[in-house]
Each structure stands twice: as structure tokens, then as C-alpha cells.
Image (cartoon, coloured by chain):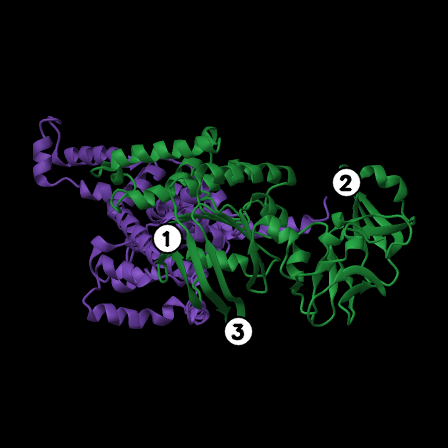
Amino acid sequence: MAGLNIENLTKRFDDVEVLKGVSLDVADGEFVSLVGPSGCGKSTLLRIIAGLEEQTSGDIKIADRSVAGLRAADRNLSMVFQSYALYPHLSVAENIAVPLRMRRLTATQRLPLVGRLMPGARIQADTISQDILTAAERLEIAHLLDRKPGQLSGGQRQRVALGRALVRDPAAFLLDEPLSNLDAKLRVQTRVEIAQLHRSLNATFIYVTHDQVEAMTMSDRIAVMMGGRILQCDTPEAVYDDPDTIEVAEFIGSPKINILPLTYGTDGQLSLFEQGLGLRGTGRIDGAVSLGLRPEALHLATENAVLRGTVAHSENLGSEVFVQVDIPGLENRVTLRATPSQRAFLRVGAPVSLGFDALAALVFDGNGHRVRGIQVAPRSATEVA
Amino acid sequence: MTRDWWKHLILILGVIVVIAPFYMMVSYSFKSPGEIDRGEGGFFGRQELMIDPRCVALRDPSRDDIAAAADRFPGQSERQIRDALMAEAEVECSMHPVVFNYSKAFTEAPLLRYLLNGVIVTVSIFLLQVVVALPAAYALAKLKFWGREAVFGLVLFCLLIPVHAIALPLYILLAKLGLTNTYAALVVPWTISAFGTFLMRQFFMTVPDDLIDAARMDGMGEFAIVWRVMLPTAIPALLAFAIFSIVAHWNDYFWPRIVVTGNRDLFTPPLGLREFKGDGDGSFFGPMMATATVIVTPLIVAFLIAQKRFIEGITLSGMK
């Protein structure tokens, strides 16, 4: 097990720059998710770490040793692919055995038929089958060892792919969207299992996903990637509650964060629809200021709130209700998280007033950067209504 | 009558055209020379006992034979003894036409030797073709290198060159190297198969890239990937190629005829057929057709066994 350092990595395919200077440090035993929309370069980054793709510039260190120019096979990393990539002609046991056979047996010992007769081959074969059994038992696939991948369900194949990755002791595990081919129920279950596996192996995991729920639930840290850069790399809580940019705030969180246009008065007051919000900026803020409010930061308010509109649509998830509200003067609907008991007030077409928690308000400048140091006026510390 | 009856009609006509020569071949291999000449006897011939005139001629008793046989025929003249011996020879040399044809096929020419040569040549050609074509196809399908499309274009171009166009230069090359009348002359020119490279490349294109990347992560080199991952997944396509290659070279008459000029030990089965080409004294169609039947049987059996996978391979439906 080892840590991993990525320094200023760039990658260019012809004239398209896919990675534009990515730096990331992953500590030993850490679970880091690379999350971002498709085409953001996260899979390319993972493939460069694995050694399957060569970087244009920059360096990667595994356990403080540069792996520049090393083949994928020599980097001692394990990878789980989205399509599982099991060898269709080999049984489950043989699939799991491949990385061990390629590393522990000599070329002559690997020969078909005669290889078994080579000196030392028998002892090696015994330890290999012992290791396969240990890995299979850990993943509860010991009863499938004789089957071919074609006879397995998606979830079982996924486990075999995991087994093939963890049967040896790699410096780090690389996982490329391993759950995206599973059905929703199995995905939730496997998510928990992978997180537990990470805890029990205490290994370094780098996990690529486009699904922010996977990233939020499993990771020690999330690296949000967009347009070939890492926009923010921090704990799931920090990325959610304290995003650095409007892109991160919009990408992380479901339903999406509400973005409202603000005006920044000369006196430092931030106002929405010409009404002061009790929020005061310090110093200069460039461009059009906007306010980010998570659906759970909004709540139903009594009369005279700044945000007033009508219910356009509501989604009842059982434990909570997401309500989309049309607000005159806003292009996009505002999403509110309500409790099921409030559904009576939230029929489509019903007028609603929304208040919000000023402490949870996120202010961004015209370039999408977060504006910190927003002061909350005492009178409205808890509610602007 | 279904609406598609005309399709079946066309197919049946096609089948008749294809089957007719085989029907004639098998039928002739059963018949006596007389039946073949007169076109009688249906498919199997009448299978009446016939006398092999050559066998009888070979047993024409000499003076010593007659003297030796005098004890068995006491009190008879030399002339009578001779007639009696001839009658015995005719009995021994009479057989059913089918037995005659097939025993001639194996005794007149060393057919087993020719069949063995055929096996040696076709199997060596196929194995060497696989050794060359699989890595080439893998490189053309899955590796990125400068000029890959141009190289693949050349492979396609090579598919268009007819064998006969390059036969003469090839022959001269082999002759200058002193390789005519060797197994090498029969095998070496065919070891690089543009068709095999093309077919396998098309199949490898359907193998997911992830599988190759997984093999690389597992510690395989590129050649290990070809033999341990690509080859086993490509078995159906390889079988299809095997049929094409083996049929083409097993049945090839043209090339062995050019490079094997004297040494009959190197004759392949089709060259063996020439042995029954009677020059002055008529042709031995019965034994010739028996030989032809023996030659094609292994191929037909192999095809029937591999039929299902063969069709899979041609339709390139392997992985999905």
C-alpha cells in the first residue's frame, strides 16, 4: 500500500487538451473519488495513473517513486473496469489467478501442460490457489469459482473483477465506474460493500464516477473535475457545504442547488429583487453576483418573503418532497425540500412564500468563484422573511 | 405454395449445380470401367464381379510355373495346365468394382504418402499463418502507431493480387534459393496470409479495449495478450480461417505442380490424381474418382464437425 502524488499532469489528444495541469495528492489508505460530468478527463486521468495512457507532461509518483515510463504491469496497481473486462474463456478461479500467475510464475512455469512440471511450480500453484480462495471468500464468490463469466449475473461479474483486483497486494486500487452497469438496488448494496472493503483492506482507492451520490457516500475526499481541471478536492462535507466555485456547487447535490441573481449595492448590501437580504459583502466583488441556496436551506415562510411564487411541480420521494416553484422574474424554477406533512400546502398552482437560512447562503461572484466573508446582519441571522 | 417458392427453386438449382460433380465422383468411384464408359448402373453400379485384366496379365504363367504346377494336374498337357492356371488367376483377380477402385487408389500410387504430405503441408501452412497473422491483426486492430491505416490499406491491396500473377517470380526466387522440390517450397510462400490478417483484424476490432487493458494491468506483455487473451476469444474466427486456409491448400493443384517437378515423395493429394491419367491405354476413371473421394472426405468431415462455429466465425458474432 502506498500514497500517490500527481504533479501538474497534462494530456493532449491531437489538438484537444483533455487534462490541463492536474495536481492531486492521495495519502496512503485514502479513498479519493474523481467525480465530474462525462468528458471532464477523469477516466483519462485514471488511465494515465494506471499506465495505460501516457501523459503529455507532468509526473506521477507512487510511494514517492516516479513511475514515468513504467509499463502498466510494472506499476503494481490494480484496476476494476466499468465493463469488468473478465477473460471470457477462463473460469472465475482462473480469472482471479491471472495477475498472480503473471507475477509469481516464471515464463516456463506458465507454459501450458509442461509448466506444471517445472521446479517450484507446484508450490507456487498451491499458494496461488490458497490466495484465490481467500479473495473469493472475502467477496462471497467461493461457490462460483468453476463457472465461466458468461454464466454469471452482472453483480457476480463485478465481484469477480474486484476479486481479480484484490487478490494480489497492489500499491493502490483504481476503480473506473465499477457500479454503473449494475441495477439501482445492487448499486446501493455494492456501494456499501466497497466502502467496507476499503476499510478492512486499509488500501489506497482511487474511484472514478460520474455519480455524485457514489462519491459522497464512499470517499474520504472528493476531487471534482471539470474541463480537464480539478476544481476542488476536499471531504464530501466540505465539497457540499462549502464549494469553491459555482460549478462545484451545481454539480454536487441532488436536486441541484438553486442559483438566484443578486445585486451588490455600493454599501455592501446584497439584495434580491431590490430587497435587502441582510447579507453584507466586504470589499469588491466582480461581475454579476449570484446566490446559491440548497433545496434544504429553503423553507416555507409566512407572508412577505422575498421569494414568492406558485408550485409548478412536486416530487414525493416518501421521506421528503421536492417542490419546484415558479417565481416571477426568475428564469429557472426554485427547488424546495419539504416534509411530507407539508404536502397539503403544496398542490400544483398553490401560492407559496419561501424563506431561507442566511447562514447556508452561498455567494458567488461573476466568474463563478465563491465570495467568502459574507456578514449576516443580526436581525436576520436565522431567517429572511 | 408459399410466396417464397421461387427462392427455394433458385436454391435447389444452385444445390444441383454444386452437388452434381460430387455425385459423379462418388458414383464413378463405385462403378466398373464398362459401366462408366456406357453410363449405366445408376448410382452404385451393379457391383457384378469384374476381372482386373492387369492382375491377370501379371499372373500369366511362365514355363517354370507350369512345370511346378504339373504335380497338381497329373496327366494333363502343358496347354491344359496353362489354361487351368489362367482360370485360377481369373478367379483370384475377380472382384467387385468398388473394391477394385478403392484398392487401386491405394496400391497404384502411394496415396497414404500423398495424404501425409497433404497433412504436413496444410497444417504447417496454417500454423505459420496463425503465428504471423495474429500478432499482425492485433497490432492493426488495437495498437496505435504511425501509418497504421496505410499498412492496413496494403493488407487489403494484397487481397487483390491473384496467386497466378506472382507465381513465376516466386518460382524463380525459390529456384535460385535451391528450394524447389522441398516441403519449404510448398509451405513458405503461403505463410503470410493477407486474408488471415484481415479476417482476424476484423474480429479483434470487436474485442473490448477494456479486456486488453485489464490484461496489461494483470502483467501481460503484448505478445502474451495475443496468445493468452486474443487467441482464445477468437477461436470461432480462427476456425473459419482454418477452413479457408486448409481447404485452399489441401486442394491446391497449381502451386505444388509448379514447385514439385520430380520428387514423387513430395506429391500432395491433388498431384496424386495425375497418376490415374492414362496416357495411351485409356484412363482409370474408377480408381481416379476413388482417390478423389478419399482426398475430399477429410475436409467434408472436418467441415461438418466445425460447421456451427465456422458460421459463427464468418458472421463475426464472437464476443457479443
Q: Nearer the viewer, residue B101 or B79?
A: B101
**Chain B, hue in figure:** purple
Q: Is residue A63 left or right of residue B6?
A: left
In this rendering, does residue A311 appear at all?
yes
Q: Which residue is mark 1?
A: A63
The type of residue carrying mark 1 is Ala
Chain identifier for the green-coloured part of the image = A
- In depth, the one of A27 and B304 nearer the eye is A27
Report the amino acid beneath label 3.
Asp
Q: Which residue is mark 2?
A: A320
Residue under mark 2: which chain is it in?
Answer: A
Residue pointed to by mark 3: A15
Mark 2 is surrounded, within 10 Å at the Cα level, by few (under 14), some (14 to 19) or many (20 or more) other residues, namely some
Q: Tell me if residue B37 comes above or below residue A187 in the rendering.
A: below
Q: Quadrant of residue A50?
A: bottom left
Nearest to N terminus: mark 1 or mark 3: 3
Q: Earlier in the sequence, mark 1 or mark 2?
A: 1
Name which of mark 3 and mark 2 comes first in the sequence: 3
